[in-house]
Amino acid sequence: MKTMKRLLPLGLLAALALASCDGQKNRLEPLPDENGLFSLSDVAKILSDLPLQNGHLAEVHDAVSASSGNGYDEEYLLTDLFHAPGAGVGDNGTSTKAAGYATPLRELFADYFSRKYGTKAGAADVERYINALSESDMQIYWPYSEDWDGRSFPIVTFDPGLGAESNYGYEVRIDASGAHVVDSVLVTEQVAMQRPVWVINRNDDAAFTPWELFEDTSTKAGDGKTATGEKEYIFSICNFKMLRHYDTWFGGASEFFIKTGAVDGFKATKDDDLKNYSPSMTDFMVVVRRNQLGKKIPFNAILLTNFTDQMEKIAFMVIEDDGGTTTNWKCSAVVKYNSKQYGFELEIPYKDKDDVVWRGQLTRNYFQELFDKGGGTLSSRLGDVEITFALE
């Protein structure tokens, strides 16, 4: 995630002095943040202790809905919670709804720390603790948020790591007298499907741009014919289906990177033309949320603007992002000219901890039927995903 540094209002800065510990030392807990001040469980406990009202639930729902609409997961970055209430990932730290919140969540945090710790902390400590919250990569993740009824209060939990599928959480509710009540309950994904659950976890996709935020500036070339009389096609993906989850539900959605290497628009008519071409790479992210398992996600992501008859093999790779050290897949894009094949070498980067869903070469012969028909779509099972390609 990209680190975002902003200054908070002085009053809020003075109030956010110290973090609390939940005292659950005998339970599975994640490591604290880099500065050692906050763990995910700390933030979950603090959030559950805040006097939440419907307006605060609406603020979180606004933010996760905005993130989802921008092509990210259902997430509300803590940095946005403090600096741009209601903003989603992809909104660039701005929110048009912030003025509509009578008491944003950030003010509840400020009041909480002010009451709990008073004004004992010095200015340096105040700034250090604020940085721990607002500059961390922590966030509120709300799976299945599209099913929220607009009234129900959440269970607040955190990602315990280690591939766990269940954890304890804090059930927040308002009793008949209007009092704020918190109970400890066991949380699983089945619970999250039935009622609101807020998971405190870490963001891993804000630094990337999903296909929804790319502008399609491509155009069809001329009259659709090359200098040799061959027809050119736009080669794209029109839908994507995930057939299994790649992460635990606490971690959120699966982030797939689709990478294509080819000599786009290759149409040599003489030997000297070969030196004018070099391979290029298309690389974009598709986020598949938990509720989209087994569903076709429609979109129009262009892989090549000019797929010609002379392009024999296209390097194609699908990975599910898990981080690690950058490495490269050494491969080639193959073209055909004058009855001979020529390979253009290229390296496609990925991370060594990523799940390689599929990698190999898409051949022109594989799409021959579409060429013969003058365009169309073709669905392919590639590992544990299904992709529908289109030629037009």
Image (cartoon, rainbow, N blue to C red):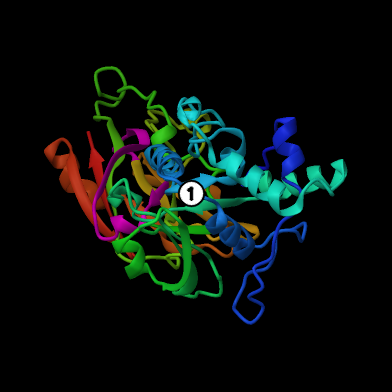
Residue 204: x %, y % from top left: 55, 52
Which residue is rendered at x = 19% and y = 40% of the image? 371
Query: Which residue in the protein does label 1 denote?
Result: 52
Whether residue 307 is in magenta: the answer is yes
Q: Nearer the viewer, residue 198 or 344?
A: 198
Q: How many marks?
A: 1
Q: Nearer the viewer, residue 118 or 165?
A: 118
Q: Is residue 64 left or right of residue 37?
A: left
Q: Residue furthest top?
A: 222
Q: Nearer the viewer, residue 300 or 316?
A: 300
What is the span of residues highlighted in magenta in the rendered image? 286-310
Which residue is rendered at x = 48% and y = 64% of the image? 182
Residue 349: x %, y % from top left: 57, 52
Quadrant in which residue 2 is drawn: top right
Residue 366: x %, y % from top left: 25, 53
Q: Amino acid at mark 1?
A: Leu
Q: Residue furthest front?
A: 177
Element on which disc 1 rests: loop
Q: Residue furthest bottom?
A: 26
Task: Please say if 266 is above or below 316.
Answer: above
Q: Is residue 253 left or right of residue 298?
A: right
Residue 377: x %, y % from top left: 19, 44
Which residue is rendered at x = 37% and y = 38% of the image? 69
Q: Is residue 142 left or right of residue 293?
A: right
Q: Quadrant of the C terminus?
A: top left
Q: Nearer the viewer, residue 152 or 368?
A: 152
